[in-house]
Image (cartoon, helix red, strand yellow):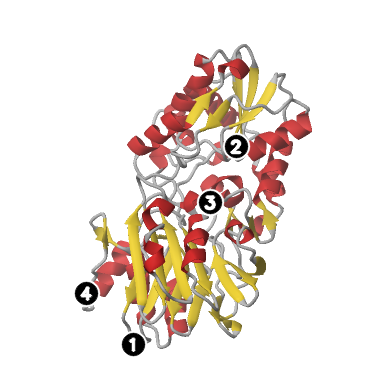
Amino acid sequence: MSGVFGILSRKDCASNLLYGTDYHSHMGTEYGGMAVLGERFFRSIHDISKSQFKSKFYEEYKEMRGNAGIGVISDRDAQPLIIGSRFGNFAVVSSGIVENVKELAAELLSSGESFSEMSAGGINSVELIAKLITRGKTLIDGIEGVYDRIEGSASILLLKEDGIYAARDRLGRTPLVIGEKDGDYVVATETCSFLNMGYHILKYIEPGEIVRISPSGLESKLPGKDRNQICSFLWIYTGYPASSYEGISVEVVRERSGRLLAKNDNIEADLVAGVPDSGVGHAIGYSMESGLPYRRPLVKYTPGYGRSYTPPSQEIRDLVATMKLIPIRDIIAGNRIVLCEDSIVRGTQLKNFTVSKLLESGAREIHVRPACPPLMFPCKFALSTRSIDELVARRAINDLEGKRTDNIAEYLDDTSEKYGKMVDWITKEIGVTTLKYQKIGDMIEAIGLPRAKLCLHCWLGEGN
């Protein structure tokens, strides 16, 4: 999942655009980009896979001049793109993923279109979105037409001379929030990008809604839809602790999640810890409920290493996982540790780079408590897990069944015998004393939205 940020100001916006975009750095690891509109478009895109966003743009942004801009931290495609069209010139960024990009691109190519922005040898999905927009009768019709055609999700910021058009994914899987300060407006994926610059939340854009932000204020160009299925993983893992979605704080959800993990547990232990950083809030909640002390046997070397989940290659994920967590033997040795984690996806990092460090430092017992149920399906709506075979729960099921199978209904039931055997298999695979997952109902309770308003596809295969 990428993160986007836009700003419309009464003065030069480049500095706030830089910092607002930078506050999305936890959302992607491939590309960073900014576009500013003044007397002309200023645009810059950099590969940030081996360096931090600010280090690439800190000097460059000073050359950008204008009152409006958009920025992006991208997990896949180089963006923003600047497009010349019959609606005028515009810059565009997007978060989400287009699952049927190849099919749509083939259709456009056969009708005479061409593509110039290629990402890793393939079609840039943001350019595809731009091409689809330009096929509309009007700009709004074109944006709406994107959602009629794509499979997956896309929230869009489009910058033109008359303002910023902010369009949230039709099912709301990726968020967009508008902030305001003294007549200046910002729009972002992450509300944590508002706080230190003094913006307050003005509006959570509705699923499918299109809003134009101009110097005269906000104008709804297309009302929102009734259906909402926002990504549950935003609260459990992806989102930043200081952010909120649909008015619900990420950190508060993680504390509630940890409390529910503890309520359903009866393990005897000496301390509670969270795998930094996204497991920390869950661990604090667990400690609050259980009365066990919260301690830090593992600390993250924050300056040089980001998330180990988001990089596209296993090699890079392993390198980040190896280097970023440093064990503190004086806290670990001889202790029974409840280890709260946001999730277990592939299981390899937890086994090889977290559990192994605790064991090598003398942990007596390790009791892992993930804040969500076993991940069973690859994500169709953001660039996270991309294949069934990489999920440790599916590897467990295939091994238990003696074949690759899609008949997993009993494994989705946390009261079934097969579910128990699957958890036992994963426990042995990652080499811990015990493993107990959060129940789906408790995860929903922790988030605090009705089940129907949450995307649960990763766990249950629901959502389309």
Which residue is labeled 3 in the image?
Answer: 457
Residue depicted at 47% across the width and 85% down the height: 162
- Label 1 is placed on what type of residue? Arg
**In the rendered structure, which disc, 2 or 3, sits on the residue that comes first in sequence?**
2
- Label 2 is placed on what type of residue? Gly
Q: Position of residue 391 (x, y in %)?
A: 44, 38
Relative to residue 337, is residue 392 depicted above or below? below
Q: Residues within 10 Å of mark 3 (few under 14, many from 20)?
A: many
Q: Residues within 10 Å of mark 2 (few under 14, many from 20)?
A: many
Disc 3 or disc 1, which is closer to the eye? 1
- Label 3 is placed on what type of residue? His
Is disc 2 in contact with disc 4, using a CB cutoff of under 8 Å? no
Which residue is labeled 1 in the image?
Answer: 86
Label at residue 279:
2
Residue depicted at 46% across the width and 50% down the height: 379
Relative to residue 378, is residue 18 depicted above or below? below
Residue depicted at 44% across the width and 76% down the height: 66
Is disc 4 in contact with disc 1, using a CB cutoff of under 8 Å? no
Is disc 3 in contact with disc 4, using a CB cutoff of under 8 Å? no
